[in-house]
Amino acid sequence: MKFLVLLFAYAVGGWAQSCSPQPGASNFARLVEVSQSSTFINYQSATADRAIDGYKTGIFSAQPCTHTNNEKDPWWRLDLKQSYKIDTIVITNRQDCCSERLKGAEVRVGNSADNKNPVCGTINDISNPIITLCCKGMEGRYVSVVIPGRSEYLTLCEVEVYGVPPSRDTNHCG
C-alpha cells in the first residue's frame, strides 16, 4: 500500500511540475530580433531567423534550421525587446543527422546581451528531437543557446518561448 501511495504522489508531483506550454499559449519568439555567432559558409540561408520561422521539421535539407560554422563556443540569441517571465522553452533539434552536436548546450535567460545570463537548463538528453526546458519564471529580455567550451556547429530547427509578458502598472495617476 505504501508503494502505491508513493507512486501516486510521485505521479501527481511530476504532473504538477510539467512545464509544457498551456493550450493557446503565445510563443514570444515570433517576429523578434535574432542573431548567431556565424552562418555556415556552405549554407548562407541557414540564418538565425530560421529558428523562429514556425517550421518545426528537423530536416536540414528542407532549410528550416539555423547553422553556424564550426567554431569555439557558438551561440544563437533571441532579443524579445522587453523582459518576460519565461516558463518554458521548447527547442526542435535536427533530426536527419548530427543531433548530438546540441548535447551540452546551455540555454540562458536574462537581461544581458553578452550570452552570460543565468542558465535555464543544459541540454543533456537528445534522444527526443523536441527538447522542453522549464525556466520557472526566469526573467529576461534575451534567450540564448550556447555550446560552451568546445568547437562545434550549432544547429537549431525551432525555438519557442512561453511565459508571461511584463506586468504593466495600471494603477497610476496621470
Image: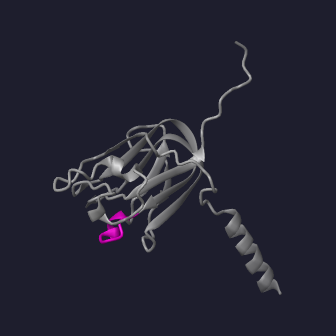
Q: Which residues are magenta?
A: 93-102
Q: Residue at x 70, y 63 (%)?
A: 16
* Quadrant showing the C terminus: top right
Q: Residue at x 43, y 39 (%)?
A: 32
In the rendered view, tell whether residue 128 sits above or below residue 86: below
Q: Residue at x 46, y 49 (%)?
A: 108
* Quadrant showing the N terminus: bottom right
As drawn, which residue projects farthest toward the right?
A: 1
Query: Left or right of 24: which side holds 62?
Result: left
Query: Left or right of 172: which side holds 77?
Result: left
Question: How many tags in the picture?
Answer: 0
Q: Quadrant of residue 98?
A: bottom left
**Foreground: 11 or 51?**
51
Asked whether 96 falls inside the magenta stretch, the response is yes
As drawn, which residue projects farthest toward the left?
A: 42
Q: Main secondary structure of the magenta part?
A: loop
In the rendered view, tell whether residue 126 sits above or below residue 156: below
Q: Residue at x 39, y 59 (%)?
A: 105
Q: Name the spot of residue 154 as percent of width and height, x first.
A: 31, 58
As drawn, which residue projects farthest toward the bottom?
A: 1
Asked whether 119 falls inside the magenta stretch, the response is no
Q: Name the spot of residue 91 as percent of width and height, x first.
A: 45, 59
In the rendered view, tell whether residue 98 sits above or below residue 24: below
The colour scheme is one colour
Q: Name the spot of residue 9 as percent of width and height, x first.
A: 76, 73
As drawn, which residue projects farthest toward the top?
A: 174
Q: Name the spot of residue 47 as percent of width and height, x first.
A: 28, 49
**Foreground: 93 or 121?**
93
